[in-house]
Amino acid sequence: MNVIDADLSAMKTADFDLSAVKTARKANILSLFTSGSTLICCALPATLVAIGSAATLTALVGNFPQLIWISEHKALVFGLAGAMLAIAGYLQWQARNAPCPADAALAAVCTKTRKNALQIYWLSVAIFAVGAFFAFIAPLIV
């Protein structure tokens, strides 16, 4: 159990409804994984080829043939990742004004959880943007 989960379980004992904060946090973590799939789809192969590691890419595709399906269906992958980012952003927006406990220690944990969730969300957006660049913009430039 990590520190934030322990702190959130300590908050459960207080009579506060932090479901909005917890839901936003879970959605942000899920959006991080869906955004990561955009890197696997497009940025990783382009990077390996750019640095001259085509043999590594061949071995990677040989061991994980699902990478070909992900690359062939990149519009679906990016659509799902974009939808997840939109949902996570909406939930993050809804949780921004959720009340934190009056207790100073619990309020600090609540604030830290919100800050971490927001950082995870923006990291997901950045990963999505890098993947989108390699999938859709870089092929037009090269």
Image (tube, rainbow, N blue to C red):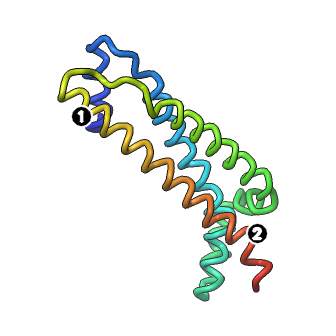
- Which structural element holds mark 2? helix
Q: Which residue is mark 1?
A: 108
The image position of residue 51, as x and y in percent, is 58, 86
Q: Which mark is residue 136?
A: 2
The image position of residue 23, as x and y in percent, is 50, 29
Identify the mark nearer the N-term, 2 or 1: 1
Q: Residue at x 20, y 22 (%)?
A: 103
Q: Which mark is residue 78?
A: none
Q: Residue at x 26, y 37 (%)?
A: 3
Crowding at dot 1, Cα within 10 Å, few <14 / some 14-19 / many 20+, comes out as: some
Q: Residue at x 73, y 52 (%)?
A: 77
Note whether 56 is above or below 88 in the view shown.
below
Q: CA distance from mark 2 to mark 1?
A: 42 Å
Camera-side mark, 2 or 1: 1
Q: Quadrant of the C terminus?
A: bottom right
The image position of residue 53, as x and y in percent, is 60, 84
Q: Amino acid at mark 2?
A: Phe
Find residue 64 and report its image quarter: bottom right
Q: Quadrant of the N terminus?
A: top left
Q: Residue furthest top?
A: 15
